[in-house]
Image (cartoon, rainbow, N blue to C red):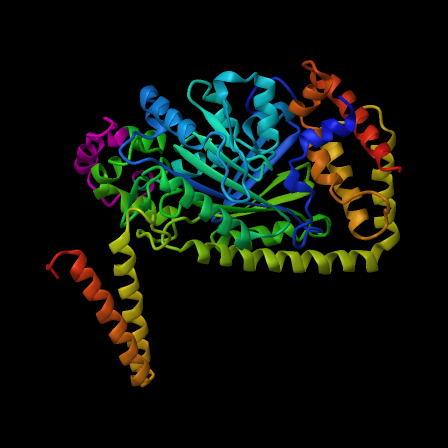
């Protein structure tokens, strides 16, 4: 497989579209948790009812299309190898949890990979919808339509007082989890995220980041999502998240400007050093790769690095994960070998940009 | 520092999650972090479960006597056989009937998790809730009408009253005569 084919395989078609505020927001996800009426939840461990759910979904939805979501393909966990599962997880089309349910777990994926529906994960159905950049209300609208489409051919467990009934009490009500993946290098560099995260938490939202040594987030990537699913309408949940995310975007833009003014040459040095590491290293750990990719992406956004496409961060964050590396290598790799392969892959990917 | 999960490799991913002011730290090696889904979108299950186990009312409030607690533990759901004790331990329901079976004890949990809320106000499935949609609309219109009355906009209030009346007639017809 050529590298270009491999990348095309790794990057879902929707990721190539440039969404709103895509200099800061990588992607938006909407997830709806749904269960079928009068069928025990997958958490009950009842195999025969899970099989029936899977059978029903396969019959009604496999190879079906709905509006922009063409040809849903059902992928059964029982039919695929563990490295393929890992690749689906790294593409965010399903959760690690689902990969473990190899008996009755399955995922229904639309052709453009924008919509995926996990079957027999923690709930019977987990409808997921991705949008490039910031697109909360668009993504919600689409997810609601998909939800209606599913409801036409199934009966949901719903209770007037508690809403959509879910396995976990944290999802009951709307079953809605809305998440926004953000790249916040300037807020991270200036240590403002450590101050902002608790403030955001107080508003009933969750901020997650992967932290390296000290307080600097690995790859400066953060996910902000709603915590509450009961007692608020879907539209209000989205609106509250949207207003916080907009403020964070604004602060990140101001910080970028400030850092450029205060220490432009140091920032430029850092960015080009990282670029150098990515372009020339022979061994690279995922942590270092994440940091350098974040710097290079910032360099692109600030116009310091030209001729490299913006999607490189999204792309290489997916490509350099263990599942994809092994998929590319066509064999299983020891951790040390992965670092070596990762460096190779990044160098080759950057060379594709030369033209 | 060794990875908290496998205890074999050096921890290289340090993960901090703050939920409502409660801080939780994880130190994992890269493989475990990937495996646990800490490095992507799909990470809510594990962390939410941990988060939830700290949320149950029995662990934190002592407003019920020991005796009541013991009797609550043995309540069993007729649908799937899950006991309240098991539910509390695993943090997950077994079926939709669990919501009925444990209903006396659930609101405090919902309140903790959902900032004091216990009632759904969002979407209603189309197929299930023809009347539910109307009931909710009537409630909303009644609030609007009250607001218009307060603003002394009686003309608009009368319009809203007519719409409420219309909806109530529709409901009346659906119910075949009962009001």
**Residue A340 part of the magenta segment:** no
Which stretch appears magenta?
Answer: B58-85
Residue B17: image quadrant is: top right
Q: Residue A92 vs residue A9: left or right?
A: left
Q: Residue A355 vs residue A198: left or right?
A: right
Q: Residue A150 vs residue A77: left or right?
A: left
- Residue A109, compared with residue B62, is above or below; it is above
- Residue A146, compared with residue A235, is above or below; it is above
Residue A316: image quadrant is: top right
- Residue B62, compared with residue B158, is above or below; it is above
Quadrant that contains the N terminus of chain A: top right
Outermost residue toward the left in this view: B178
Q: Residue A200: x percent and y percent? A: 54, 54
Quadrant that contains the C terminus of chain A: top right
Which of the pair A55/A302 is nearer the observer? A55
**Residue B66 part of the magenta segment:** yes
Report the residue at 85% width, 37% height from top.
Answer: A353
Which of the pair B44/B26 is nearer the observer? B44
- Residue B88, compared with residue A248, is above or below; it is above
Residue A280: image quadrant is: top right
Residue A120 appears in the picture as rendered: no
Which of the pair A288/B143 is nearer the observer? B143
Q: Residue A120: x percent and y percent? A: 41, 28
Report the residue at 49% width, 41% height from top.
Answer: A66
Q: Residue A292: x percent and y percent? A: 78, 38
Count of number-bearing discs: 0
């Amino acid at each position: 497989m050529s590298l270009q084919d491999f990348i095309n395989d790794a990057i879902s078609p929707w990721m190539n579209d440039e969404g709103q505020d895509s200099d800061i927001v990588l992607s938006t996800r909407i997830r709806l948790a749904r269960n079928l009426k009068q069928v025990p939840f997958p958490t009950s461990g009842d195999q025969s009812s899970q099989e029936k759910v899977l059978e029903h979904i396969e019959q009604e939805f496999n190879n079906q299309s709905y509006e922009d979501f063409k040809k849903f393909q059902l992928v059964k966990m029982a039919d695929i190898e563990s490295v393929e599962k890992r690749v689906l997880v790294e593409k965010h089309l399903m959760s690690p949890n689902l990969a473990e349910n190899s008996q009755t777990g399955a995922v229904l994926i639309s052709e453009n990979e924008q919509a995926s529906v996990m079957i027999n994960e923690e709930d019977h159905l987990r409808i997921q919808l991705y949008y490039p950049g910031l697109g909360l209300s668009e993504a919600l609208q689409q997810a609601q339509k998909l939800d209606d489409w599913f409801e036409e051919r199934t009966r949901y467990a719903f209770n007037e007082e508690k809403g959509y009934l879910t396995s976990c009490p944290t999802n009951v009500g709307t079953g809605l989890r809305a998440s926004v993946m953000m790249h916040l290098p300037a807020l991270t560099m200036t240590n403002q995220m450590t101050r902002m995260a608790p403030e955001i938490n107080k508003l009933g939202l969750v901020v997650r980041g992967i932290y390296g040594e000290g307080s600097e987030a690995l790859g400066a990537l953060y996910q902000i999502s709603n915590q509450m699913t009961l007692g608020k309408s879907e539209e209000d949940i989205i609106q509250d998240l949207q207003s916080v995310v907009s403020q964070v975007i604004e602060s990140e833009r101001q910080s970028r400007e400030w850092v450029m003014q205060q220490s432009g040459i140091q920032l430029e040095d850092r960015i080009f050093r990282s670029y150098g590491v990515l372009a020339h290293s022979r061994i690279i750990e995922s942590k270092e790769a994440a940091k350098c990719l974040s710097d290079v992406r910032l360099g692109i956004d600030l116009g310091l690095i030209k001729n490299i496409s913006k999607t490189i961060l999204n792309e290489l964050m997916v490509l350099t994960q263990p599942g994809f590396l092994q998929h590319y290598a066509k064999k299983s790799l020891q951790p040390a070998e992965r670092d070596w392969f990762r460096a190779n892959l990044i160098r080759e990917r950057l060379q594709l940009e030369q033209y | 520092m060794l990875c908290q999960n496998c205890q074999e490799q050096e921890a290289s991913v340090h993960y901090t999650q703050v939920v409502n002011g409660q801080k939780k730290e994880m130190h994992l090696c890269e493989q475990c972090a990937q495996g646990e889904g800490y490095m992507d979108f799909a990470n809510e299950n594990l962390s939410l479960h941990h988060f939830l186990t700290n949320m149950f009312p029995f662990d934190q409030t002592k407003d019920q006597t020991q005796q009541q607690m013991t009797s609550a533990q043995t309540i069993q759901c007729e649908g799937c056989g899950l006991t309240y004790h098991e539910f509390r331990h695993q943090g997950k329901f077994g079926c939709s009937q669990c919501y009925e079976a444990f209903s006396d004890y659930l609101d405090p949990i919902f309140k903790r998790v959902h900032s004091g809320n216990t009632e759904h106000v969002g979407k209603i499935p189309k197929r299930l809730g023809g009347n539910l949609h109307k009931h909710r609309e009537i409630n909303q219109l009644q609030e609007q009408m009250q607001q218009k009355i307060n603003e002394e906009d009686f003309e608009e209030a009368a319009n809203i009253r007519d719409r409420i009346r219309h909806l109530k007639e529709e409901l009346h017809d659906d119910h075949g005569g009962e009001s």
